[in-house]
Image (cartoon, rainbow, N blue to C red):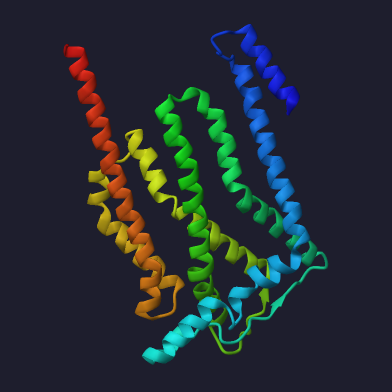
Amino acid sequence: MATEQKTTEQKKRKNPEGEMSFLEHLEELRWHIIRSVIAIFVLMIVAFMFKNIIFDKIILAPKNPEFFTNRILCRLGELVNVKALCINTKPVNLISIKMAGQITTHITVALVAGLIIAFPYVLYEFWKFFRPALHNNEQQVAKGGVVVTSLLFFTGVLFGYYALAPLSIHFLTTYEVSADVVNQINIRSYIGTLTSICLATGLIFELPVITYFLTKVGIITPGFLTKYRKHAVLIIVIVAAIITPPDVFSQMLVCIPLLILYEVGIVISKRVVKQKEMKHKEFMNETAS
């Protein structure tokens, strides 16, 4: 690390303007990537060491009746007399069909955990790489964007874990094409489904950030988002109907946050367009004067 800083200082002394060549930019990017990989690897080792907490308390918890969401929905189902809300009442027994299945699963889960936990640091490293190319006001916006992006990602992961995962596990483990077919769930399949749900919702919750950048570069507009709002609502409702039990409450539990995110995206897009119009107006006034 000290060697890298010394090298950077030497380059700045050679080039007073602070400009770097293409190869120097690649070297700088390489160090940011190396530090990100090291952070992921270290957190992966930490996750690997805490096997009992990662598996028993986190990954395998949503399939058990004692899980927070399962208990709350079951109590609500009793109050409103809707039995369909009582999900995952019977624990799902998982199997491993390969000799090295459990150790490879352990390593894979540790890697995914390292990626998720290191996500804010990885964003910070890339922000540091792009920071010199930004103006002071843009640096403040980008720095705030790192915080907002991380919060949205973890909020999405938690929403997927506590809301979508129990509903999806209940639906997929109880669905049957025939009474003669017994579900024997492989642990890799279970973890793959859980991971996909959490990561997918984490990325979906980045919709306001994605909308901001796409509007910034002119790919989408508030008019476009407003025009296709009905299509977006239809897609969200269809997805919610597929992954939730056949009751209105569960579907609303999934739909409402996603619809709110879409509306927030429209508001953000309008603000970005308004800022661009103001800057253009100021530029035209300066040119005219």
Q: Where's residue 52, x and y in %?
A: 74, 69
Residue 250 versus residue 69: which sits nearer the camera?
69
**Count of numbered tags:** 0
- 40 relative to 34, above or below: below
- 78 relative to 183, above or below: below
The quadrant the N terminus occupies is top right
Q: Where's residue 167, x and y in %?
A: 49, 75
Whether residue 107 is visible to the viewer of this picture, yes or no, is no
Is 229 left, or right, of 171 in this rendering?
A: left
Is 95 left, or right, of 61 in this rendering?
A: right
Rendered residue at 59%/14% (across/down): 21
Q: Quadrant of residue 215?
A: top left
Residue 218 versus residue 175: which sits nearer the camera?
218
Q: Where's residue 75, x and y in %?
A: 46, 87
Whether residue 209 is visible to the viewer of this picture, yes or no, is yes
Residue 285 versus residue 81: which sits nearer the camera?
285
Rendered residue at 30%/61% (across/down): 233
Is 127 left, or right, of 6 in this rendering?
A: left
The quadrant the C terminus occupies is top left
Residue 97 versus residue 27: which sits nearer the camera?
27
- 269 relative to 183, above or below: above
Rendered residue at 20%/19% (across/down): 284
Most distant residue in the right direction: 99
Q: Quadrant of residue 273?
A: top left
Q: Where's residue 142, x and y in %?
A: 45, 35
